Image (cartoon, rainbow, N blue to C red):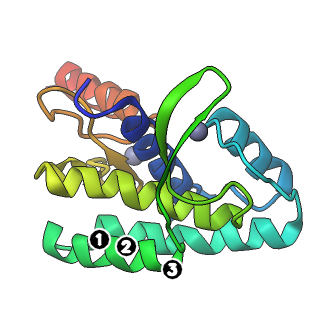
Amino acid sequence: MIFAHDTETILRAAARLVNSDSPTSGDLLTERAQLDEFLASEGYSGEILGTVAELTRVRALRPRLRRFWDVPDRDEAAALVNELLVEADARPYLSRHDELDWHLHLTRDDQPLEHRIAAETAMAFLDLIRTDEWARMKTCGATDCADVLVDLSKNRSKRFCDGGCANRMHVTAYRARQRG
Ligand SMILES: [Zn+2]
Ligand SMILES: [Zn+2]
């Protein structure tokens, strides 16, 4: 593990959220049920209203998060992180609940869902910046895919998104070899 468990989980969730607004595979977050599935599988807790308005606000967060993959360097990313923390009204505090020992919470549990997602994601990006690991923020290497990924592999060798591109590219390369 390179980063704290929390950080890795949140980075993966952030990439997944951004990729739900995919230039290649379309919008995968149009229904409330799709958001509920995302929240459950990524382990988001706290107050969830379950409304369409909430869905709309989470959808609006996606292009904001996508910008982090589009900035040229970590200096611009740092400015974006600071912006996002203010907007999300982040107020860090320590919490101990359920079976979890003291850990950091960034926003109150009754803050709007999109603020909580934004604050957590900003903190995870912050980890990448302060450890000078921003190069792990990547766009899929497949020529016909613009989805994003956070490369959490030890040797930073991950090139393709989790949307099946790695497999597809291997098959393409294999066929090319067969022909060649
Ligand atoms: Zn907690
Ligand atoms: Zn891809």
Q: Earlier in the sequence, mark 3 or mark 1?
A: 1
Front residue of this view, candidates 151 and 143: 151
- Element at badge 2? helix
**Residue 67 has which mark?**
2
Q: Residue at x 25, y 22 (%)?
A: 174
User: Is label 3 or label 2 in front?
Assistant: 3
Q: Is residue 109 left or right of residue 3?
A: right
Residue 137 x/y as whole percent: 26, 53
Q: CA distance from mark 1 to mark 2?
A: 5 Å
Residue 151 x/y as whole percent: 26, 39
**Residue 70 has which mark?**
1
Q: CA distance from mark 3 to mark 1?
A: 20 Å
Q: Residue at x 45, y 56 (%)?
A: 121
Q: Residue at x 75, y 72 (%)?
A: 56
60 vs 69: above or below: below
Residue 1 x/y as whole percent: 26, 23
Q: Please report contact status of discs 1 and 2: CB closer than 8 Å, yes or no.
A: yes
Residue 175 x/y as whole percent: 28, 25
If the image is split into quadrants, where does the C terminus sit? top left
